[in-house]
Amino acid sequence: METAAIEMETKRIYRDSIFRAYFREPENFVQLCNAVTGLNLTADQVTENTVDDVIFSNPRNDVSFNAGNASFVFFEHQSTKNLNMPLRMLFYLSMLYRSIVPEDLIYKGNEIYLPAPRFFVFYNGRETFPEESTLKLSTAFSMPADIELNVHVYNVNYNKNFELLRGCRPIHDYSFFIDQVEINKRAGMTLEESVLKAMKTCIELGIMKDFLNAHKWEVFEVLSLVWNEEDAHKSYYAQGLEQGREEGREESKFEMIKNLLLAKTPMKYIIQASGLSKEEILKIVAENNRVI
């Protein structure tokens, strides 16, 4: 694959991956769910039912939850236009119903209770797209059919949908983060430089702070699609060095060391970033009683 194509794919992946990881956290999901559905759920009233449970792989659907006892709510992120989302949502819904309904019950006479589905897409690509719109499955048919599925699409670019972004902090913060990346890209930075600076800016402003601190290394894993191994290690090292200088507490130092080790960063870089000897690094790890 050509470098430009890889970078384009990586750009799509990092947006999708961050969206999935951020909105698979129940509190963030609930706030966005309430904003677009008018429900008044709390985090303890929802249960995730997303097909795949791996944050940065390629799950069949992005995010879905049982919303209370009455409905399924599906969230999908899109950075390019896709008018086939109603069909995709139909596939997701079918898979989910099949997973919760015992097959023998569909042949019995009693009606089966099914949670009512709601479908939402959040778009933040560059193409022109309305702030709010609805995609319908029926437009794919060449003649009238006895089935319909509506997908509600929200344009969540940072200069769009001010009412939604003002009313829902998680989608505002996600939109702000992506916008910062794009601003940095337009200033001539590479994608990895743009993401790194956007993460630093957002953490300093308290935007997605806890999430970014917890998942910054997974973001780097996504970006590594366009990094060679040595460049990736150097970037991990640079981030670790900055964090090591700013955070002097032992717990913070342990987190830095842990993340560098998980990233398979050579020990010589960890020693330089932390200012510690190899023996001291291993001692800190052992004292925290955690397995790397």
Image (cartoon, rainbow, N blue to C red):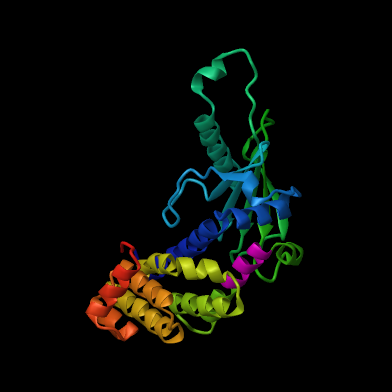
Q: Is residue 35 visible?
A: yes
Residue found at x 42% / y 74%: 251
Q: Nearer the viewer, residue 222 or 27?
A: 27
Q: Is residue 85 left or right of residue 282?
A: right
- Image quarter in which the N terminus is found: bottom left
On screen, residue 152 above or below 56: above
Q: How many marks on residues?
A: 0
Decide whether residue 270 is among the magenta residues: no
At which x and y percent is residue 193? Answer: 45, 79
- Image quarter in which the C terminus is found: bottom left
Residue found at x 24% / y 77%: 267
Residue situated furthest front in the rendering: 287
Residue found at x 53% / y 77%: 198
Q: Is residue 233 left or right of residue 199?
A: left
On screen, residue 277 above or below 261: below
Decide whether residue 172 is among the magenta residues: yes
At which x and y percent is residue 94? Answer: 54, 33
Q: Nearer the viewer, residue 201 or 92?
A: 201
Residue bounds of the magenta highlight: 169-177
At which x and y percent is residue 126? Answer: 59, 67
Q: Nearer the viewer, residue 264 or 146?
A: 264
On screen, residue 160 above or below 39: below
Q: Is residue 149 visible?
A: no
Quadrant for residue 6, please give it.
bottom left
Quadrant for residue 274, please give it.
bottom left
At which x and y percent is residue 262? Answer: 32, 66
Residue situated furthest top in the rendering: 109
- Overall secondary structure of the magenta stretch? helix
